[in-house]
Amino acid sequence: MRFVLVYKMIYNFATMKKQILLTLLYVLITVNLFGQYNSVLSEGKWFKISTNKSGVYKLDYSSLVSLGVAVNNLQMEVECCRN
């Protein structure tokens, strides 16, 4: 009798684990398929600027011009997050 109880507990745990993994897989696939099309970042022209040192950098008008960015029609938006 005790063996049957242990077997049922293991079986229920395995079934629950399988359901959790399938649900997680479904969520990840759904987010991956539909998340890319609703992104705010999917529009506009983006520039990637890399550095070889860590820190905070200031990009001013002359820096952007020297990098070849057409600054005449450049629209900049800054958003701040406040607690």
Image: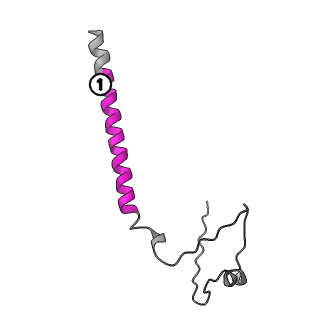
Please state the horizontal and vertical placement of residue 12, each as a whole percent of the image: 30, 27
Mark 1 is surrounded, within 10 Å at the Cα level, by few (under 14), some (14 to 19) or many (20 or more) other residues, namely: few
Q: Is residue 27 magenta?
A: yes
Describe the element under mark 1 as helix, strand or loop.
helix
Which coloring applies here?
Answer: one colour
The relative height of residue 79 versus residue 32 in the rendered view (above or below) is below
The residue at the point 32 percent across, 16 percent down is 6
Q: Amino acid at mark 1?
A: Tyr
Q: Is residue 24 magenta?
A: yes
The relative height of residue 80 versus residue 45 in the rendered view (above or below) is above
Left or right: 36 as drawn, with respect to 4: right
Left or right: 35 as drawn, with respect to 63: left
The residue at the point 60 percent across, 64 percent down is 81
Q: Which image quarter holds the N terminus?
A: top left
Q: Which image quarter holds the C terminus?
A: bottom right
Location of residue 8 (image quadrant): top left
Quick one: which residue is furthest to the bottom in this view?
A: 72
The residue at the point 65 percent across, 67 percent down is 50
Please give the range of residues in magenta.
9-35
Please state the horizontal and vertical placement of residue 4, each as a whole percent of the image: 26, 14
Please state the horizontal and vertical placement of residue 59, each as a whole percent of the image: 70, 76
* Magenta segment main secondary structure: helix
Report the residue marked by disc 1: 11
